Amino acid sequence: KEKAKPKPQRSGHVFLLIDEGELFLERRPEKGLLGGMLGLPGSDWVDGDVPACSGAPVPAPWASRGEVRHVFTHFALTLQVWQGVSPEGKRPNGIWVPLADVDGLPSVFAKAVRLAA
């Protein structure tokens, strides 16, 4: 049996924006991977490196929480996980859920939440 080709590697950033015990989520575009599902805000997933804090939902002091890896059918993904607190008075419009209610997120995002928790 031949060895399988290594999966292409992609990278990106995700952001855990927290305010008063709630986590900010965004609905992903309908088309594409994880289409229409709730997820963490972040950068595009690209081949190569992504500039630090690319895709942050608000300007804030973002603290690195490490990285998570996830393998999809056609590629492997490494996400840098950043955590921050919503600046006072700058809570973005979107979907806010209690931190305890994130069990229904796609597994790649759930991994990031567990890493930072």
Image: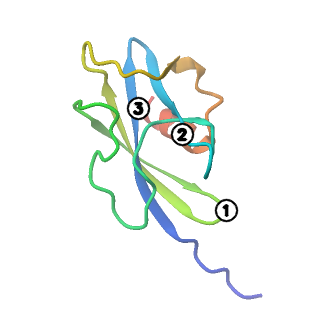
Q: Which residue is mark 1?
A: 73
Amino acid marked by disc 1: Thr
Q: Which residue is mark 3?
A: 16
Using residue 72 as the reference point, say whether residue 82 is left or right of it: left
Amino acid marked by disc 3: Leu
For mark 3, does the 10 Å Cα neighbourhood hold few (<14), some (14 to 19), or many (20 or more) residues? many
- Please state which of residues 61 and 32 is positioned toward the viewer in this rendering: 32
**Are circles 3 and 1 on residues that touch, CB within 8 Å?**
no
Amino acid marked by disc 2: Phe
**Residue at 65% from the left image edge and 29% from the top image edge:** 104
Residue 71, position as x, y percentages in the image: 60, 58
Colour basis: rainbow
**Are circles 1 and 2 on residues that touch, CB within 8 Å?**
no
Residue 97, position as x, y percentages in the image: 53, 18
Using residue 90 as the reference point, say whether residue 12 is left or right of it: right
- The disc at residue 109 is 2
